[in-house]
Every structure is written in C-alpha cells, then in structure tokens.
Image (spheres, rainbow, N blue to C red):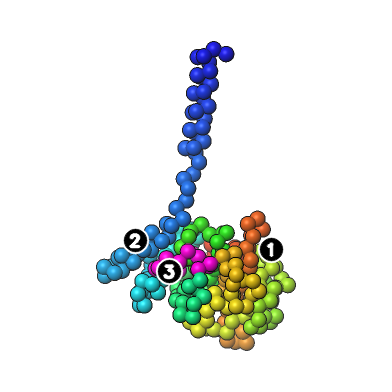
Amino acid sequence: MSILDRWRVLAILVCAALAVLVARPARADRMALWTIVHGQCVAHALAGEAPSPCERIDLTGGEDRGVALLKDRNGVAQYLAIPTRRVAGVEEPLLLAPDAPNYFAFAWAARTAVEAKLGKALPREQIAIAVNSSFARSQDQLHLHIDCVRPDVVAALADYRDSLDERWRVMTTPLNGRRYWARKLDSADLADAAPFRLLAEGVEGARAQMGLETLAAVGATFAGKPGFVLLADHAELEAGGHAEDLQDHACAIAQSPQ
C-alpha cells in the first residue's frame, strides 16, 4: 500500500470516528431539574412574579423547606414535585429527620394539576406518587412523580386491599412483574404521615441502603375511609424495581368510563 493510500484509509477512519461522535447523543444534564427550579422558578417567585416554568411553588417555610410543581415533558398529565433546596434523592439523610419537609403531602395535593390536564377528576385509587431509586433516576435532584396508575396495578391493588394492614409485608401478587413490599396507611392526604421514614423504619435493611429503595404511595379506600397503599422495592440494575413503572404516563385509565 502506497503512502497516499495509507493516508486515504486514515482519513476515512477519522471521518467515521467523527461521524459516530456526532451521532452519539449528548450526555444528559443530571442537574437540569435543579437548574430550572432554583434558577428560574424560585428566582421568579422571590421577585414577586409567577414561578414560571413551574406550575406552582410553596416557599412558606423558606427555600430550605420549599417545594415546586413542574409539568414533566413526558406524559400527558405527569407532574413532578421538586424540593427548592438541594436534595439529591431518596438516599438523603435529611428525608428521615423528624422535621423533614412533607414532600409527599405537597405531591398529593398537586394531583389536582394532573386532573386539570386530563379535564376530569379521578378516583384516588387511580393516582400515585412515585420516587425512583438512585439506579433508576435520570436527575440528581429529588423529584416525586405524580401521575395515573396503570390499569392492571389498580385492579391488582383492589383485589389485594383486604390483605393489607399497618405492617410491611412482601405481596404475594406481583405488580409489573415485581413483588413489592406493601402496607396500608390510614391518611386522607399524607399531611400526617412520613412515607420515607415509614420505609426506613419498617422494611428490613432499607435504612442502610435507602439509595437502592424505591417508594410509591397509591390512593386507596379502606372500609369507606380514605387512605393509601405504600409500596416499596429494592431496585436492581438489571431486574428493575422502579416505582415509576407502576404509573402510566399515557393515563389510559382516564379514558375508561368511571
């Protein structure tokens, strides 16, 4: 092979390598939610303006205890409840403090935003709040997913409801192929509950590995009284275990007759 031919081959290889690099998607910004909430929503609210692009924001206790509501770009009605202070995720020790902000209560109250997007009210059993483990999240700022529940999960929990009590137990019925830990929670709106602490204190080994835990609160009714089913799973890289998987971002159940 002549020197000229070698240069031609090298040029072809370089061009191919550059093409691969250009085609490869840019690395996702894992701090995008924090940048939006802190840099825009909070800044606008403190300036006396609407907290755009957030739907709403609660800074009653100050930024360290605040939480914002942001429409997720995925899903027809999915919203995210996001702390206005830096909280990486479920592994943060501050979430287990006795005086920790009640992000779950804010998220449940924000279900009205989901219903507004859908143009209809939903039974509480059809809405869930989900927090993914450190394995499954795309963002390193805590965010609680608020959205519809998968129809098959709604049906499975309705059949399983009478088997639940105030103790965490592994379900005998799988949800989306996983056997979740589950317990009932008597609460109308989660204002009097601390799901993160209930998980850490009630599921064996959870406190020591909170970053690997995933958690969901699904609306429920027990003996005519409002409550929730709390669901937890120990995430695995290959086998899943992500509470968001129990939600349906297309909200198919909202299209079903009530």
Question: Are there few (<14), some (14-19), or many (20+) residues within 10 Å of tag 1?
Answer: few
Whether residue 132 appears in this view of the structure is: yes
Q: Residue at x 65, y 81 (%)?
A: 167
- Left or right? Give the position of 168 relative to 65: right
Q: How crowded is mark 2: few (under 14 residues within 10 Å), some or many (20 or more)?
A: few
Residue in the image at 46% along x and 45% along y = 26
| Discs 3, 2 touching: Cβ within 8 Å | no
The answer to which of 14 and 124 lies nearer the viewer is 14
The percent position of residue 10, horizontal first and vertical second, equals 51, 23
Residue annotated with mark 2: 39
Mark 3 or mark 1, which has the lower sequence index?
Answer: 3
Q: Nearer the viewer, mark 3 or mark 1?
A: 3
Residue beneath disc 3: 83
Q: Which of marks 2 and 1 is nearer the N terminus?
A: 2
Which secondary structure type mostly characterizes the magenta part of the structure? loop
- Residue beneath label 1, please? 177
Residue 82, numbered label: none
* Magenta-colored span: 78-92
Residue 246 quadrant: bottom right
How many neighbours does mark 3 have within 10 angstroms: few (below 14), some (14-19), or many (20 or more)? many
Residue type indicated by callout 3: Pro
Distance from Cα at disc 3 to Cα at disc 2: 13 Å
User: Could you tell me the amino acid type at mark 1?
Assistant: Gly
Per the image, label 3 sits on a secondary structure element best described as strand
Position of residue 129 measured from the top left corner of the image (x, y, whole percent): 53, 71
